[in-house]
Image (cartoon, rainbow, N blue to C red):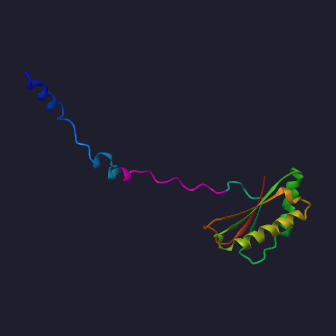
Amino acid sequence: MRLLPIVLALLSFTGCALIDQRTFAPAPEAKAQTPPPPPAAAIDPRTPLVTIDYSLPSPDYGELLHDAVRAAQSRDEDVQYDVVAVMQDMSNATQGQERAIGVMRAIMRDRVPASRIHLGLRADPTLTADRVLVYVR
């Protein structure tokens, strides 16, 4: 009779497996079934008021920018502007800043106070030429 509990205990462990590193390691199939990462979201989904393309050394944007600023001012006198220089990489950030400041000064000539103009700088490796984008808020 004393042997019966021991035999029952041994029989109950027959369905168990030993715990080792394979128990906690992920299956190789799990890595292959991971979904691909989602596509990169657009950096700024807004449509720019003006896009100044610097594929030419000195683009003539003065009149176009003046007309666009006047049109935006006619809709809202307190409109604010985001002037963003976009470059292929940040190795020439100084030139991008100078271009954005030049566009800001052109907007200020249309009697827009500097407090309503916000400057920005970002990189986009998909570009073929640097550009300055002007957005309205």
Q: Residue 91, located in which quarter of the rendered image?
A: bottom right
Question: Taking 79 as reference, is 18 above or below it?
Answer: above
Q: Does 81 sit left or right of 74 as displayed?
A: left
8 is within the stretch colored magenta = no
Question: Taking 4 as reference, is 38 above or below it?
Answer: below
Q: Residue at x 81, y 67 (%)?
A: 103
> Which secondary structure type mostly characterizes the magenta part of the structure?
loop
Q: Residue at x 65, y 70 (%)?
A: 90
Question: Taking 129 as reference, is 11 above or below it?
Answer: above
Q: Residue 100, located in which quarter of the rendered image?
A: bottom right
Question: Taking 120 as reference, is 11 above or below it?
Answer: above
Considering every residue shown, the one lying at the far top of the view is: 1
Residue 24 picture location, percent across and down: 32, 46
| Magenta region, residue range | 30-43
Residue 50 picture location, percent across and down: 78, 62
Q: Quadrant of the N terminus?
A: top left
Residue 84 picture location, percent across and down: 74, 62
Considering every residue shown, the one lying at the far right of the view is: 111
